[in-house]
Image: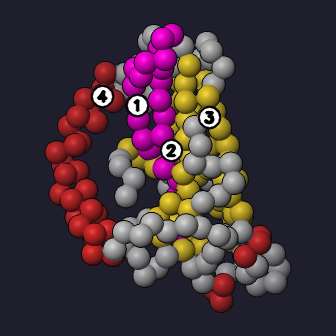
Amino acid sequence: MQFIRSSVSRARQRQVAALACALAPVCLPAGALAASQGAAGTAPGKLPASATLEQCVTAVEQGERSATFVGEMTAVAGTARMLMRIDVLERPPDEVVYHTVSYPGLGVWLRSSPGVKTYKDLDKVTDLSAPAEYRAAIRFRWLNAKGHLIKALELRTPRCDQPPPASAPAASGPAVLALPSAGQAGSPGPAL
């Protein structure tokens, strides 16, 4: 899998990670408040979007390894159009933070048709390196009829662990971990 790493130093990455951890308790009340307010068509306390890991396939052969990520969003009051962006993040075992990987079709904003009430995108990423952890950072935006931002949210999916090839399944084929949609919703938080 080809990917592009940023030129940020490891020391700077650790500083950013430490800052994000330090600010997390400060940011939680605002996120909890937003979640408790609810959205049009959603129950109070339920987010108007979800980020899930639909499937994680491990294998000895790199070409057989994959992860399938799903983002789904529901219109909030005043929504005319919705936008979604899925970025795949990778973390090798010797790294502290995840890095965005370049993959065809990902990392671009996808637009719903006007008036859509529920917008869903499913993306399968193949040819994953091992050992490494993969997850997706999914960004959601709700726009009004004038194209102005009403709401923005970023969620992360659960991770897809790709073990070292030696501990992957034998020549019998890839191991598929199909995750149920319920209970697998992503967690809010900034992407590092």
Q: Which residues, given as a range, are shown in magenta?
A: 133-155
Q: Is residue 183 visible to us here?
A: no
Q: Position of residue 88 (x, y in %)?
A: 56, 56
Q: For marks 4 and 2, give the one nearer the viewer.
A: 2
Q: Which residue is mark 4?
A: 34
Earlier-in-chain disc, 1 versus 4: 4
Query: Do the residues bearing badges 1 and 2 touch, measured as CB atoms within 8 Å?
Result: no
* Real-space Cα separation, disc 1 to disc 2, in angstroms: 11 Å
Amino acid beneath label 4: Ala
Give the structural element (helix, strand or loop) at label 3: strand
Q: Which mark is residue 152?
A: 1
Q: Which residue is mark 3?
A: 110
In front: 40, or 4?
4
Earlier-in-chain disc, 3 versus 4: 4
Amino acid beneath label 3: Leu
Neighbor class of circle 2 (other Cα within 10 Å; few <14, some 14-19, many 20+) is many
In front: 151, or 43?
151
Q: Which residue is mark 2?
A: 138
Q: For marks 3 and 4, give the one nearer the viewer.
A: 3
